[in-house]
Amino acid sequence: MTRTIAIHLLGLLMAGCACLAQGQTCESPKIIRVSLIPKKSSDALGAEYQPLVKVLEAAVRQPVEIVMASSYGAVVEGLLAGTVDLAELGPASYAQAKARDNRITAFASMIQRVGPHTEAGDSYRSLLVVRRDKKFHGLPDLRGSNISLIDPASTSGALIPRQAIAKLTGMALEHYFGRITFAGSHDRAIQAVQKGLVDAAFVSSSRLDEAVRNGSLRADELQVLWKSSPIPYDPFVYRGQLCQPVIDKIKQAFFQNSASLQDMFRGMNGEGFAHVSDEQYRGIREVYANQP
């Protein structure tokens, strides 16, 4: 009898240790916290992604909240600190996050419809834009001019332009242009060019298309002086510390509930979510790793 009790207690202890070990290796947060890089204003982002929040809440059966961020870097820091569980990053900010925590995993990305400056599919471009009524006809005309970038961790608004200017001119971006400012979002950079606050800006083609769609920019108001090669579209990522059942439910929300998200997709000029992996962002990660 004593031996049977001892074996039973040992089994309970082993089960307890297994639970403890599992608790140490994965997390099931009571609230799923989602953050988004500030491509536009916080109010606009929050409204845009509310349908996804509702679908996520139904899938994970617990509250989901959007954590607004003031910068691309703030989203990365939230993932690293564990205060953000799920995020939409830019390719460069994903490279930054992945370099610091390899467990951060890209799993989804928006499929886009065609736009004036963006091909249909899973990529976009970095564009150098100026006002059409200014006397700028090419990159040489902008030497010494004032330009706007987006954020130090923006792909189309910082990383790719730095690489391109170095290759095209043999000079660092900061040396080729005059005063450089960071707008904080693509919308604000476009507005800065419109208002003449800067001579030019590097922006995302998809954000430029959206400005035309929502009427804040006339189709003929800005001129594109340069465009990059295709860039893989922004990945959604999750923290690697999340338990697999939580990850599975998140993926279910993205890939098995597309009918509930059609209005959101239409508003974002998208068609749905596509499966992605780290391999699709290898090129961006290499650029990020090799930057000066």
Image (tube, rainbow, N blue to C red):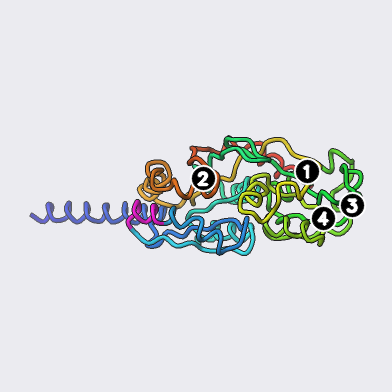
**Residue 76 sits in which quadrant?**
bottom right
**Which quarter of the image is occupied by the N terminus?**
bottom left
Tags 2 and 3 touching, CB below 8 Å: no
Tags 4 and 3 touching, CB below 8 Å: no
Expressed as whole percent of the image width and height from the top left, the position of residue 222 reads: 77, 49
- Residue placed under numbered mark 2 in the picture: 105
Tags 2 and 1 touching, CB below 8 Å: no
- Residue placed under numbered mark 3 in the picture: 175
Q: Earlier in the sequence, mark 2 or mark 3?
A: 2
Please tell me whether residue 226 is drawn above or below residue 76 in the rendered image: above
Q: Earlier in the sequence, mark 4 or mark 2?
A: 2
Expressed as whole percent of the image width and height from the top left, the position of residue 168 reads: 86, 38
**Which disc is residue 48 wearing?**
none
- Residue placed under numbered mark 1 in the picture: 224
Report if residue 125 lies within the magenta region.
no
Residue located at (87% from left, 43% from top): 139
- Residue placed under numbered mark 4 in the picture: 147
Q: Earlier in the sequence, mark 4 or mark 3?
A: 4
Looking at this view, is 189 or 80 the one in front? 189
* Distance between mark 4 and mark 3 Cα atoms: 12 Å
* Distance between mark 2 and mark 1 Cα atoms: 34 Å
Q: Secondary structure at mark 2?
A: strand
Dominant secondary structure, magenta: helix
Amino acid type at circle 1 is Val
The segment highlighted magenta reads 54-61
Residue located at (50% from left, 60% from top): 47
Q: Secondary structure at mark 4?
A: strand
Q: Residues within 10 Å of mark 2 (few under 14, many from 20)?
A: many
Q: Nearer the viewer, mark 1 or mark 3?
A: 1
Q: Secondary structure at mark 1?
A: strand
